[in-house]
Amino acid sequence: MEKHDRIYVAGHRGLAGSAIVRRLQAEGYSNLILKTRAELDLRNQAATDAFFAAERPAYVFLAAAKVGGILANDLEGAAFIRDNLLIQTNAIDAAWRNGARKLLFLGSSCIYPKLAPQPMKEEHLLTGRLEPTNEPYAIAKIAGIGMCQAYRKQYGFDAISLMPTNLYGPNDNFDLKGSHVLPALIRKFHEAKISGAKDVTIWGSGKPKREFLHVDDLADAAVFLMKHYSDPEIVNVGVGEDVSIRDLAMLVRKVVGFEGTLVQDTSKPDGTPRKLLDVSRLNSIGWKARISLEDGIAQTYRWYLEQPLSREFELSTAR
Ligand code: GFB
């Protein structure tokens, strides 16, 4: 990948895509192609084909997706499977058809079976039943992996697939109904601290364990693998360590400086009991995560505090 190559980052306003753009810009890549959803709806095949035919990017980071936390996945399964299948099918096919040299597809650790052995290795894909709360999303992502592998085999298209663990960082979604656990906790503890509330409610039993990767680490890994990895096999991208939701909540409480107690809402789902990635393949290719969970949360909390009041207002009314 040369500094002047045409590089399309799909989903550049989202958590992962915006971090990939920051990373590429920091490395001096000067020819980035970026389109908002209003300018290009990747669910629309004709619009996607026309965009790729006109722009002909050489490299594609496919970070556009419909994503959300456990509740959004559970309640909006139809949209999760439809939008993701459309986005990835249209983009992968149009990239290949219009001569892209390489495409990087972002999957998710939820593609693995609900009760996969821990830590989860790449070969555990398609060895058991999925977690029901995010099965539609997971099936779409598994289809994307299959598409990258089939296009490589049949057409020789250099498409690679990364499976990131739960991501967090700047530009995350802080809407409490749609978000993942980490931004939800940052917002809940912050608002409780400001309002002087006595407690903060966390969903579920607090016992599930999750692994969290700062999105700047993900972006670093994505650019590294775009340069150095070319293989049909998927690659897990994580830190190799996990934490219980209760311990995560205690850590966010400490970073935010909230002094009250935790209450559990057990009417909300726990989801997969544990979701820890085996990152030995990634480590053997030569990459390791660098940002510790506590530092990453502190950085994300600072970012959250710096957002203009108008954005804070938007976030509050989105509830
Ligand atoms: O991050 P999260 O929504 O998604 O939830 P998953 C992780 C755990 O945190 C669950 C608990 O056990 C939640 O019940 N939790 C506690 C909370 N308090 C909260 C809260 O205030 N908000 C949220 N959202 N959770 C998603 C998948 O699964 O992970 C997606 O649904 C995707 O498909 C993504 O793969 C990475 O880790 O359970």
Image: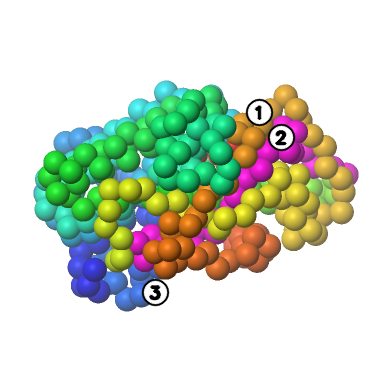
Give neighbour class at mark 1: few <14, some 14-19, many 20+ (Cα, 10 Å): some
The verdict on residue 211 being magenta is yes
Q: Are marks 3 and 2 in contact (CB under 8 Å)?
A: no
Residue at 72%, 32% in the rendered image? 204
The residue that disc 1 covers is: 269
Decide if ligand 1 comes within 8 Å of the CB at mark 1: yes
Image spot of residue 299 (x, y percent): 62, 65
Inspect the image, locate mark 2, and give the three-letter code of the amino acid beneath it: Trp
Mark 1 lies on a secondary structure that is loop
Residue 203, numbered circle: 2
Question: Visible in this render: residue 68?
Answer: no
Residue 99 coordinates in the image, percent (x, y): 11, 53
* Number of the label disc, if any, that sits on residue 26: 3
Going from the N terminus, do you reach mark 3 or mark 2 first? 3
SS for dot 3: helix
Name the quarter where the C terminus is drawn: top right
